[in-house]
Amino acid sequence: MPSYRSGSSRSTHRTATAVGMLLSVLALLLTLPGTATAAPDDGPAPAEPAPRGNAWMGMTVPGHEGGRGPDRTPPGLAASVEGVDVSSHQGNVDWNGLWGSGVRWAYVKATEGTYYRNDYFSQQYGGSYNVGMIRGAYHFANPKDSGGAAQANFFVDHGGGWSKDGKTLPGVLDIEYNPYDGNDCYDMSASAMVNWIRDFTNTYKARTGRDAVIYTTTSWWTACTGNNGGFGATNPLWIARYASAPGGLPAGWGFHTFWQYTSTGPIVGDHNVFNGAYDRLQALANG
């Protein structure tokens, strides 16, 4: 074999050996503390959706419409009747403390979809009644989960019923922005959403003899029902707006019955006012 080929082979071997040693050293360095290369920064991890059942009345309002509302009843509403809404997030509620602060009515989350019941419902629903409050139950709607009739039946079967005892308010359909996944309107068209709400309210009326209160915001109702005006003549409106006034109302309603004005209540829960004197609240309870 010619000498020049032999020299070339030795040179190639030496180069390959040197490259191999260099790669080995680099691999060793990467295993030492503090020498590992940082992973690419892809920004914060996407927020995990809240577990189903975790929603509460007004949960989605600040994130979509801003504000948290005043920390006390807005001026000019002193004659209105103060109330609270609570869920499992409040646990065992100090009803005596709320009564002492002037709260005279309460709504308690009973159910959500067809999959959730409030573990604290008995203490909250019974405790508010025992301290002297007029109270009722609410259902957090998840139209993506099941039909309106199915959810109304689930609600009535698990705390959302009504009795003519002068202390029980009609049940509430809490229909607001989707807190879990998909778009704000639960991936439903306006006509499909209207039909869903109608199925719920018709079923609730058939089961209890009362028209359910509808809790919502004007912006959600406009976006997700096409600002449908077909419920104002039958279903009392509970408007959510964290400001010094309830603002414009959805189509069909000339006035609100309840107004959730803040998510920063002075004691516990979101705070609300009934739009009228105490005897009118009693009349609503009596049907």
Image (cartoon, rainbow, N blue to C red):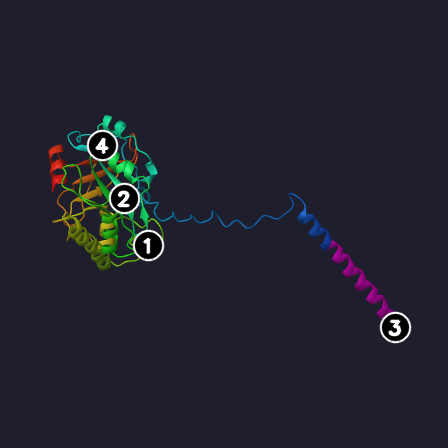
Q: Which residue is mark 3?
A: 2
Q: Which residue is mark 1?
A: 183
For the residue marked with disc 4, what is the amino acid? Asn
Work out whether residue 86 or residue 131 is closer to the camera in this orientation and state it.
Answer: 131
Quarter residue 123 falls in: top left
Tell me, yes or no, whether the two marked residues, 3 and 1, touch with CB atoms within 8 Å: no
Q: Which of the numbered marks, if any, corresponds to residue 144?
A: none
Q: Which residue is mark 4?
A: 130
Camera-near label (2 vs 4) is: 4
Q: Which quarter of the rendering shows the N terminus?
A: bottom right
Instruction: State the CA–CA distance, disc 1 to disc 4.
Output: 41 Å
Quarter residue 82 falls in: top left
Instruction: State the CA–CA distance, disc 3 to disc 2.
Output: 94 Å
Q: Is residue 9 left or right of residue 188?
A: right
Q: Residue at x 33, y 54 (%)?
A: 183
Instruction: State the CA–CA distance, disc 2 to disc 1.
Output: 25 Å
Instruction: Read off the magenta span.
Output: 1-22
Mark 1 or mark 4: whose residue is earlier in sequence:
4
